[in-house]
Image (cartoon, rainbow, N blue to C red):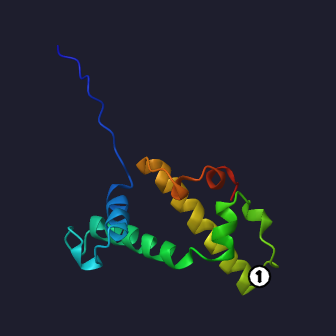
Amino acid sequence: MSEMTEETRFNPHKEEDEGYLAAEAGRIAAENPYPRGTIRYEEWRRGWQIKRDEAMREGDEGYLAAGSGQALTDNPYPRGTIRYEEWRCGWQIRRDETLRAARLGKTGHNADPAAPNAKP
């Protein structure tokens, strides 16, 4: 019997990562390669939208806080306020961006090791 030497890896974020990288490369949402109405289409579009949202949040306080290594619990605003939620959203976007960069093997500001270590 022949032994299988190559390991098959399953990436549950494949389509999402493809969409993210497409947005990063400047491609438009209409360039989604998957058929409308499929889960793959929706996941690709989700990744594309995540990158678009990141670009809009890069100057937010929470985004910058996550980049400097602050924890989610360092949110300076009172719970239940709009500012609290905006700060939290920016922090989570940066943390997710950092985790994605690590998954994709990227380096630079997107791979800051401080954010993944912070507890949500």
Q: Position of residue 62 (x, y in %)?
A: 68, 71
Residue 33: which quarter of the image?
bottom left
Q: Residue at x 39, y 71 (%)?
A: 46
Q: Amino acid at mark 1?
A: Gly
Q: Quadrant of the N terminus?
A: top left
Q: Residue at x 80, y 78 (%)?
A: 77
Q: Position of residue 27 (x, y in %)?
A: 28, 73
- Local crowd at mark 1 within 10 Å, few (<14), some, or many (≥20)? few
**How many numbered marks have been drawn onto this rendered protein structure?**
1
Asked which secondary structure carries label 1, the reply is: loop
Q: Position of residue 2 (x, y in %)?
A: 18, 16
Q: Quadrant of the C terminus?
A: bottom right
Q: Foreground residue, 59 or 9?
A: 59
Q: Residue at x 54, y 61 (%)?
A: 96
Q: Give the residue number, with chain letter if any, for mark 1.
A: 80
Residue furthest out toward the left: 1
24 horizontally vs 80: left or right: left
24 horizontally vs 40: left or right: right
Q: Foreground residue, 4 or 103?
A: 103
Residue 76: which quarter of the image?
bottom right
Residue furthest out toward the bottom: 82
Residue 114's place in the image compared with 91, above or below, is above
Q: Foreground residue, 5 or 99?
A: 99
Residue 35's place in the image compared with 81, above or below, is above
103 horizontally vs 117: left or right: left
Q: Residue at x 28, y 77 (%)?
A: 28
